[in-house]
Image (cartoon, rainbow, N blue to C red):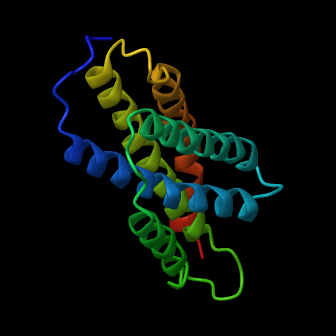
């Protein structure tokens, strides 16, 4: 950790944190849907753990915002939530059942969310340093990295199921 930044730009920090809160809001919805759609499959345990971590990251980000006195942008968060719902409407090769292509795209979406959050925690760690008001984000950064590695293990099988065969 470095020394806490004392010259943070309040408006930019608020925008940055709210953009990431919007992303993690959509990420929680994708993670929950993916767990539900993969119940009873070999993917379930990893996806459930990733979902729990994304939910924990959302709580942690809100705590950081509270400590830094950054108001949540409900409109931005709501648009992200709605965008995730609208994204479900696209056909993924199967109209009435869960498609292997849906699983593949959801895994990639979760990898994207975990990558963004890993970077978020690294940035906050660098900028806030030893600021004792702010929760330690090191464990969250490490969880995101572990989740990326676990999702990468699932990706080849999901890709084969989605993109090969009849």
Q: Residue furthest toward the bottom?
A: 95
Question: Can residue 164 be seen from the camera position used here?
Answer: no
At x 56%, y 82%, the residue is 93
Q: Is residue 107 visible?
A: yes
Front one among 99 and 134: 134
Q: Is residue 102 above or below residue 1?
A: below
In this rendering, is residue 89 above or below 100? below
Q: Which residue extends farthest right?
A: 40
Q: Give the x, y percent position of residue 99.
A: 63, 74
Q: Is residue 24 left or right of residue 19?
A: right
Q: Residue 122: name its quadrant.
A: top left
The percent coordinates of residue 142 (x first, y second) are: 49, 24
Q: What's the residue at 39%, 40% (across, down)?
A: 69
Dividing the image into 4 quarters, which one contains the C terminus?
A: bottom right
Quadrant for the N terminus, please. top left
Q: Residue furthest front?
A: 69
Asked if residue 110 lies left or right of residue 48, the reply is: left
Point out residue 129 in the picture as x, y percentages from the top left corner: 32, 16
Q: Residue at x 20, y 32 (%)?
A: 8
């Amino acid at each position: 950790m470095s020394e806490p930044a004392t010259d943070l730009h309040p408006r930019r920090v608020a925008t940055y944190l709210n953009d990431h809160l919007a992303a993690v809001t959509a990420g929680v919805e994708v993670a929950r849907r993916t767990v539900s759609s993969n119940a009873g499959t070999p993917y379930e345990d990893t996806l459930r753990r990733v979902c729990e971590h994304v939910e924990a990251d959302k709580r942690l980000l809100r705590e950081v915002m509270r400590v830094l006195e950054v108001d949540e942008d409900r409109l931005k968060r709501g648009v992200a939530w709605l965008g995730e719902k609208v994204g479900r409407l696209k056909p993924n090769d199967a109209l009435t059942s869960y498609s292997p292509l849906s699983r593949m795209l959801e895994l990639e979406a979760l990898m994207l969310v975990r990558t963004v959050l890993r970077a978020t925690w690294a940035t906050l760690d660098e900028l806030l340093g030893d600021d004792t008001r702010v929760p330690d984000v090191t464990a969250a950064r490490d969880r995101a990295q572990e989740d990326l590695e676990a999702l990468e293990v699932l990706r080849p099988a999901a890709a084969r199921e989605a993109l090969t065969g009849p």
